[in-house]
Image (tube, rainbow, N blue to C red):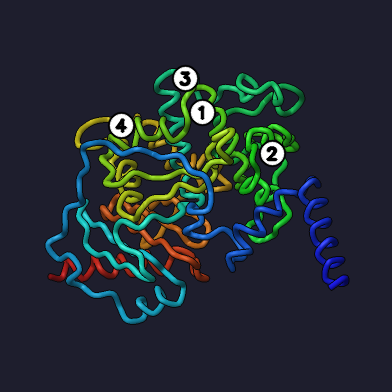
Amino acid sequence: MKSALISFSVIVTIIILLYLSPIGYVIPGVFKIYGTGHTTAFLDDYKIFDNLIVENGSIKTKWNHHNLYNQIPLSKEFDSINKKYKTVAYLIFHKDSLLHESYYLGHNSKSKSNSFSMAKSMVTAMLGKAIEQGYISSLDQKVSDFYDEFSQGVASKLTVGDLASMSSGLDWTEKYYSPVNITTESYFTKDLEKLLLSRKITGQPGKSFKYLSGNTQLLGMIIRKATGKSLSDYFSKNFWIPIEAEEEALWQIDGIKNKMEKAFCCFASNAKDFARFAKLFKNKGRWNGQEIIDSSFVNLSLNPRFEKSPNYGYGWWLLNRNNEKGFLMRGHLGQYVIVFPKSDLIIVRLGHKKGPKNEGYYIDEAFKMISDVEEH
């Protein structure tokens, strides 16, 4: 009994010391992630964090069904891939109609799941809207106009456009499985603003592409400060309501005290509503004939800023496949919303594991299916 008490006291002491240390954020991580049997953030983790509601409007529209809706089966090989990599949703939209939808592992059309970094495309779109509405002057506006912490040295050159195009020079390590690093800390901290303002600019801003989640978090903070609105409210009013989302969404925050959204990730929604946002960009910023976001900003977003990094624009990943240009939202563990405008094709894949070919599996199957459609 005495040895048990001593062991318990030692464990409690270690936990307290760890909690009070600079890596105290590890404690909630142990309980919320590792304590639930996961080794990294997971699809349903919005249930164990605080969230703000992203409201949808009174007008909710459903996707039209293609005349061959769910009549062309997935290939057996691809179906096995979905099971192997624990896909929860796979949808194909062709010519703005739902051609195919499959759900797995208890998910359905209304199931919410974590967007992870797909949210970066949403935050960048809000930057475009904030510029359009005059809250931010342009992509060239300096970050130091919003935060004095970036007013000295090389940091004084940093612009909001550099953040959106992943070219900030920010001191940041992008890791998702290590419990002790800045990306993990940003997931569990109770004060995202304080954390980001403690980071330094160690490289030359605006010179080259380097994907860092801290860029989008700082951009989200600037948008909130410039507009005077939470990201959830601003996105709801300017995007989620106008595109007639069927369901409200949730956006994880750093806690009920500061209520700062995790701008680099963690927008929980369903597959069909994720596809709506991609459709908005496929249609050059218009929805039912109404301009939601300026087409010139859409065009800028979907083209590379740097010649040496042709796979990224402003908040969107870019690709060429089947001799066609496409763009996509991409998130941890294989969350994809992929658009090929020429083929009028949108593909959504949500799941627990990304697989070795990344989005390739899901693109190839979709093109095979629309080829079969043309033969009917």
Q: State which quarter of the image contains the N terminus.
A: bottom right
In the image: residue 126, left or right of residue 184: left
Residue topped by disc 4:
292
* Cα–Cα span, label 1 and label 3: 8 Å
Q: What residue did someone put label 3 on? A: 135
Label 2 or label 1, whichever comes before in sequence order: 2
Q: Residues within 10 Å of mark 3 (few under 14, many from 20)?
A: some
Mark 2, other Cα within 10 Å: few <14 / some 14–19 / many ≥20:
many
The residue shown at (69%, 59%) is 178
> Mark 1 vs mark 3: which is more N-terminal?
3
Spatial separation of the CA atoms under disc 2 and disc 1: 18 Å
Q: Nearer the viewer, mark 2 or mark 1?
A: 1
Marks 2 and 3, Cα distance to the nearest angstrom?
A: 24 Å
Query: Could you tell which of marks 4 and 2 lies nearer the N-terminus?
Result: 2
Left/right placement of residue 369 relative to residue 13 reads left
The Cα atoms of the two marked residues, 4 and 2, are separated by 31 Å
| Secondary structure at numbered mark 3 | loop
The correct choice, above or below, for 110 with respect to 21 in the image is below
